[in-house]
Amino acid sequence: MSGLEEMSREELIALSRALLVENARLTERVTVLEKENAELRERVARLERLISRNSGNSGMSSASDDLPGKVQPRVKPGRGGNRRPGKQPGAPGTTLAWSDDPDDTLDHFPSGVCGCGADLAQAADLGITARHQQVEVPLMSATTIQHNLHTVACGCGKVHAAARPDGVPSAPVSLGINLRAWCVYLMIAHAIPVHRCVELVVSLTGAQPSPGFVHGMIARAATAVVQANLRIRALLTAAYVVCCDETPIRVGAKKAKKYLLVACTDLYTWYMLGDRTMATFKKFIIADLSGVLVHDRYQNYDSAELGVHLHQLCTSHLLRDLEDCAETYPGAAWPAQIQTALRGLIHAANLAREQGHQAMNAGTQAMWINSFRHGVRVGLSQVRRIPGPAKTVTQPIGRVLLEVLRDRENDVLRFAHDLQIPPTSNQAERDVRPAKTQQKISGRLRSEQTTEHRYAIRGYISTAAKHGADVMTAIRDALLGRAWMPPDPLQA
């Protein structure tokens, strides 16, 4: 600094003190800025991770992939890239079958005048030269049927009155059972809102039910299937394997967040409206289950409060979590190795099941399990645990997953040792999909009670469809007081 040589001792001391104070202030400012910078880095990292989450590396739905700023799922090699739409090479073809007993036959003859001036109506018939069959549905039109109930007197003096036919209520004018079943079918099976359901019925049939009547059919149908649902629940508790899942839905005027829980097999479906608390899970079917529980690793499924169960962790969720690890650690080989091993075991299990075998090939099983274990060990060695209590320390991405794959190997690979156990909870995912469709259409459901009614009916028709029963017939029979019932497997 110029002029320091001319400064006195007292001036130099004063300058030094001023510089010390300024240095302390700047040091404090740098400390604050470093802390703010670290917080911003952490915040940016969290935001980047949230943006990177999609249907390919997490449990998020594919609909969220289209949100602004979202990173699209990575395209897997050999998956769909050059696949053309429609029938694939080698796949069996399908065509409309010719009927030897058509419902109706119409003969068509040439009409008009021949070039010679003769009327073709008088021409000689040389026989059929071409035949064409067409599958058609008749135009529907609602008809009003009047039921006159007669009273007769027997010769002995007794008087007998005719009973009302099934499905005809005591009201002077009512809607027929087929129209009522159509309303329930459209609202529950296809998530058609009430007013749009009324519009469809009017357009297709000419009948004009009121929106209030149509909405009231939900409660009536739910009451009609109570006994069937009780039986479905009882059969699920005795099933060898049960898949479970839950999905958020908005219910009520304030769009309260609730959860729809489902327990299902390939033959049964049962729903419950609640939330993700332990109180709801205690009311759910899990505590009564005697079989293997297939789920997405949500902590409540493992709670000791629900009893002791055998578990199969959904490999679809594990594969998505491993995809997240592959994107987080692009240079690491272990995520792809574990994914390949899991997919190899799933393919081997499916192949053995299709061929009617009781177990997969032992050599194939050992090869993929060894590859799985080696990948987990390598991952654990590269993604180190950070010491400290779990509540205060956030572990690196993939560390907790790797510990699950190591410590719960039996729950991850149970499907590889027992072909009756599916490797995924995809059945449950399929059975909760109607709730997601409903949410997209209407945004929310108006009341908890109506929502419970909707899914009581949905569980009933889903179970009926899984057994090969016609859904419309099942709804119609339920409204007539003779609901379809799932057969007893011990008597099948």
Image (cartoon, rainbow, N blue to C red):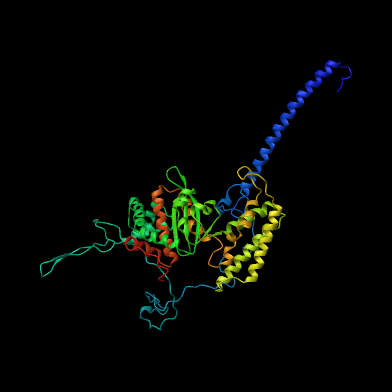
> Number of labelled discs?
0
Residue 365 in the image: state x and y as whole percent.
63, 68
Q: Which residue is rendered at x = 61% and y = 60% of the image?
A: 409
| Image quadrant assignment for residue 351 | bottom right
The N terminus, quarter of image? top right
Q: Does the image show residue 81?
A: no
Residue 18 in the image: state x and y as whole percent.
78, 21
Front-most of residues 103 and 337? 337
Front-most of residues 387 and 346? 387
Compared with 25, 171 (above or below) is below
Q: Which residue is rendered at x = 39% and y = 61% of the image?
A: 231
Compared with 286, 350 (above or below) is below
Front-most of residues 290 and 329? 290
Residue 352 in the image: state x and y as whole percent.
58, 71
The C terminus, quarter of image? bottom left
Front-most of residues 413 and 217? 413
Q: Answer left or right for 48 relative to 13.
A: left
Residue 37 in the image: state x and y as whole percent.
69, 37
Q: Does the image show residue 402?
A: yes
| Image quadrant assignment for residue 463 | bottom left
Q: Which residue is rendered at x = 43% and y = 61% of the image?
A: 462
Compared with 32, 261 (above or below) is below
Q: Answer left or right for 299 relative to 322.
A: left
Q: Answer left or right for 491 relative to 402.
A: left
